[in-house]
Image (cartoon, helix red, strand yellow):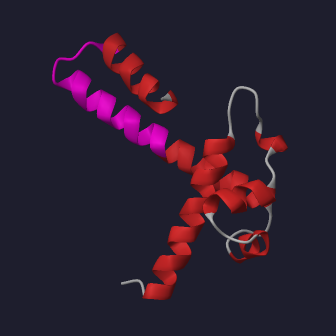
């Protein structure tokens, strides 16, 4: 079981990852992300960022890992729906659409 301090640290780390994801768009790449902007959106001081990640690259690797996990979960759910008689194409498209919403 996590202590209160560990839970808060994980919550802040999660906020940083979510803030970084929210700043990405078709017009804005990962390379253009600002540590200060990500920290500000997460509600922490920029210097506190380094308590959670060594640098922006480590944040990026965490984002890639989480995206891969999410994609595997979505595909597992799609396979389960297909096994229950769902349409392969409709199920796949609806799950992929869910990722990009």
Which residue is painted at 79% across and 47% down in the image?
33
Percent of width and height locating residue 32: 83, 42
Q: Main secondary structure of the magenta part?
A: helix
Which residue is painted at 70% across and 26% down in the image?
26
Magenta extent: 70-88
> Does residue 60 belong to the magenta stretch?
no
Query: Which of the 4 image quadrants contains residue 78?
Result: top left
Let me know if residue 57 appears in the view.
no
Percent of width and height locating residue 82: 25, 22
> Does residue 87 belong to the magenta stretch?
yes
Query: Which of the 4 image quadrants contains residue 55?
Result: bottom right
In the rendered image, the vertical position of residue 4 relative to residue 53, given as above or below: below
In front: 30, or 76? 30
In the rendered image, the vertical position of residue 29 relative to residue 63, given as above or below: above
Percent of width and height locating residue 43: 63, 65
48 to the left or right of 1: right
Which residue is painted at 54% across and 62% down in the image?
14
Assign the N terminus to one quadrant of the image.
Answer: bottom left
């Amino acid at each position: 079981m996590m202590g209160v301090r560990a839970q808060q640290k994980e919550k802040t780390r999660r906020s940083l990852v979510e803030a970084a994801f929210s700043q990405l768009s078709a017009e804005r790449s990962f390379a253009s992300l600002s540590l200060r902007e990500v920290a500000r959106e997460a509600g922490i001081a920029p210097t506190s960022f380094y308590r959670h990640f060594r640098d922006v690259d480590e944040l990026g690797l965490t984002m890639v890992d989480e995206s891969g996990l999410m994609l595997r979960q979505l595909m597992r759910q799609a396979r389960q729906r297909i096994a229950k008689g769902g349409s392969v194409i409709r199920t796949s498209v609806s799950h992929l659409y869910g990722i990009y919403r």
